[in-house]
Image (spheres, rainbow, N blue to C red):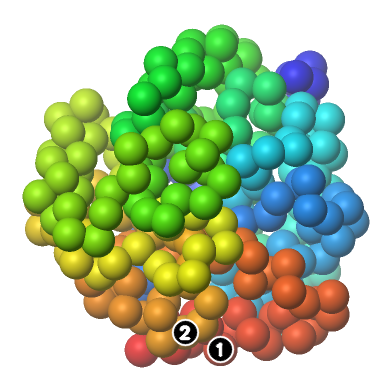
Amino acid sequence: MPAPLRVGMRPSSHPDLLSYVRDGSRGAGHVILIDPNLQSQEEAAKRAVAAVSAGSRMVFVGGSTGTDGDNVHATVVSIQEALELCSWNASQDAGMSEDDWKVPVVLFPAGAHALSSAADGITFMMLMNSRERQFLVGEQVMGAPYIKEAGVTPLSMGYVICAPGGKVGEVGRADLLQVDDEELAAAYAVCAEAYGFSLLYLEAGSGAETPVPTSLIRAARNASEKLILIVGGGIRDGQSARAVVEAGADYVVTGNLTEQFDDTESLRKALSTLISEMRG
């Protein structure tokens, strides 16, 4: 893991990261997921800028495989520097305001080996339906001292993988939630709230053919109004994103969609359309 080096959010922008995440005044939020193993740090920065200019409210950095402290840290630093430059440029010209670019860069880690001190926050997660202690508490115990020393803000999160699950379900050795597991989805939400988690993430897996079933999302939402509900995996267009939001999601995460575009302007337009349709 890199030595602590803060390049974090400006103190005047979002001093309380959780309050920023909880703020639903602009409706459902979009999160772009950047996998450092699937693109260069320069390309990651360009895609993050395109996403923020399209309306994304957070940038997640991480992946299930192929990430380590080096490529994660380099990617986070590159994104932070690009957003800082955009914010400065906005202060000199019309168009987007400085605050529009003050978007948190948050770690979405595979484990304690893939952290960065330059991130604003981290989804400090328990993979709740894993069969392995490693993903319930093991990686968290190893990473917690570094996170505290680096000053990276933890966002406590329950992480639940739904069928088909993809690589993350395989690596995390998860007992996948099935389409008819509404009661179990609700129970995980109640459990996450009882643990004191702030976020609950329902994940269908990277590259999933379909998103998390709306029945599971609705069950989790109805079981807990306190949790910030995040849904990712298999969301490729505004219609599917809208269905997820109508079922109760506060945030929608897209990752594979981002990687389909070599041209960042095409990516910006695609994400702008998705976000607009998602918010109805």
Task: State the image coordinates of residue 67 (x, y, percent, origin top left).
Answer: 74, 36
Q: Residue 96, located in which quarter of the rendered image?
A: bottom right
| Residue name at image x 59 percent, y 35 percent | 109
Q: Which residue is mark 1?
A: 273
The correct choice, above or below, for 172 with respect to 101 in the image is: above
- Confirm whether residue 228 shows in the render: no
| Residue name at image x 56 percent, y 89 percent | 273
Q: Residue 95, located in which quarter of the rendered image?
A: bottom right
Image quarter hosting the N terminus: top right
Pointer 2 with pointer 1, Cβ within 8 A: yes
The correct choice, above or below, for 38 with respect to 106 in the image is: below
Q: Which SS class for mark 1?
A: helix
201 sits to left or right of 93: left
The one of 279 and 69 positioned closer to us in this rendering = 69
| Residue name at image x 70 percent, y 50 percent | 35
Image quarter hosting the C terminus: bottom left
| Residue name at image x 57 percent, y 46 percent | 167
The amino acid pointed to by label 1 is Thr
The amino acid pointed to by label 2 is Gly
Task: State the image coordinates of residue 72 (x, y, percent, origin top left).
Answer: 75, 37
Q: Residue 163, located in which quarter of the rendered image?
A: bottom left
- Confirm whether residue 131 shows in the render: yes
The correct choice, above or below, for 95 with respect to 68 in the image is: below
Q: Which residue is mark 2?
A: 238
